[in-house]
Image (cartoon, helix red, strand yellow):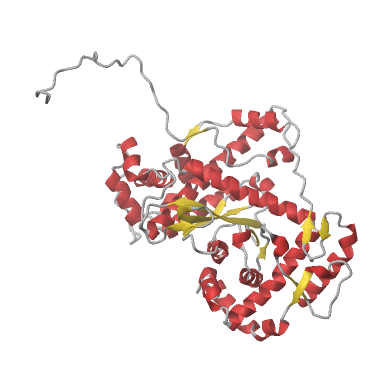
Amino acid sequence: MRRELTATAVAVDADFPSNAELTIDADGVPHLKQLRATSLPEGLPGFEMEVHARMRERHLLDILRDGTFWTNFTRHFGPPSGADPKLTRAEQRYVFTTFGYGCNLGPVQAARHAPAIASADTLRRLNAQHINTSKLEAAMTDLIDAYNRFPLPKIWGAGRAAIADGTHVPLRENNLLGAQHIRYGAYGGIAYHHIADNYIALFTTFIPCGVWEAVHILDGLMKNRSTIQPDILHADTQGQSEPVFGLSRFLGIMLMPRMRNWGDATFYRPDKSVRYQHIDRLFTREIDWSLISTHWQDMMQVVLSIQAGLVLPSMLLRKLGSHNRKSRLYQAFRELGRVERTLFLLRYIANPEIRRTIRAETTKIESFNDFLDWITFGGPIIKSGDPVEQEKQVKYASLVANAIMLSNVADLTEALASMADDGLHVTPKLAAALSPYTRKHIRRFGKYELDMDDQPAPLVPKPLPFDLPL
């Protein structure tokens, strides 16, 4: 790592005269020119219109039904004993439970609109006794693996990168995880999502507002059991810290965040005696290599415990939080993270392609958050005050999102094939501009029928069966 940091700094210094986008002011603060917006492929609006015209109109329940036929994800649901559920039309009711909770309708409203499928009490019982967080994660994995079988998502991303981000979720007051969030200025919690660079949701969890999101950023990749196994991780400023950079290096994960005010970050020299011709003002401190080497074995033991599944990264990072600054293990992870973050910052200022990739990938998670808002049309507020149910609620929504994406990819693949058969212009660049978050062809609220021949009785006010008070 010392050789890597030394070589990288020398290379960035040598390329500085030709880097027209980077300047360093007298205080040693780096400044980068704003990246140009990526141009859209020619003919994209007409191409998208033709693609959407060839996609079948569907309802959310139809999509969930097709998803379980293709993957049988409802096989994970059932009693804790693992025995047969002894439930009539079990698969249908599991699908409807996923719809009711995933769209945040709740058992009462969902049952009111489809009383022939299940009552509210039945939906509550299935959610409480037959479905838990691990079963929802297993169902999500089935949909991810089916999605990954299609070639179209590989145009959007190779599956090597993941993007993590949290979004505010309103809660009813007086519950264990609810708090007033400083950044959002509202009461609630945080739904923390990991999606792959090909848009599919890999992992979702629910965390309280007061937690620095980077504490939970590595959990999603450790718990991911799908065929998509990213080793690059993007996030925003909340998704990084020096200990997280250090732990990521041990786990073989390259952390590449979109940092706000990144110019204020500290650059560390590989040695106090080293000087550079052009970028010397960037470096204000140096790495304590002896601290890292002294505690290397201790850090390795911790990481092996994580890889063995004995401890989650979030548990370790909480222990190494701001209340343990005197811990030598914390200091060692922090020092290692300083090396890794300096390497990232040097590559970030030297390579515009890295900056462009980070911006493009982090934009995808913003689209995913908007997609989830559309899915949870039953309301933005998580109604339960139980932390277990709050965790399940956000996982239900991601399960529905993955089912929609699988259905959309199947329909988009058919539409592109039919367009090519008809001799229309179909290119990888045009296909790359599409997204599995499309929903113009999806009906969320069912299909209403209006029979004007069914006329009500004449409107004739009748007298009340009692006298009105004077």
Tell me what residue is drawn at x 79 percent, y 66 percent. Answer: 28
- Residue 24 appears in the picture as rendered: yes
- Residue 84 appears in the picture as rendered: no
Tell me what residue is drawn at x 33 percent, y 58 percent. Answer: 83
Comparing 434 with 38, the one in front is 38
* The image quarter in which residue 337 lies: bottom right
* The image quarter in which residue 20 lies: bottom right
Comparing 350 with 1, the one in front is 350
Q: Is residue 182 left or right of residue 431?
A: left
Q: In this view, does 92 lie to the left or right of 294?
A: left
Q: In this view, does 62 lie to the left or right of 292?
A: left
- The percent position of residue 142, horizontal first and vertical second, equals 51, 52
- The percent position of residue 91, horizontal first and vertical second, equals 38, 46
Residue extending furthest toward the front: 470
- The percent position of residue 209, horizontal first and vertical second, equals 48, 59
Q: In this view, does 152 lie to the left or right of 8?
A: left
Q: Quadrant of the N terminus?
A: bottom right
Q: As displayed, is residue 42 above or below residue 181?
A: above
* The image quarter in which residue 438 lies: top right
- The percent position of residue 175, horizontal first and vertical second, equals 36, 58
Q: As displayed, is residue 82 above or below residue 469?
A: below
Tell me what residue is drawn at x 70 percent, y 68 percent. Answer: 341
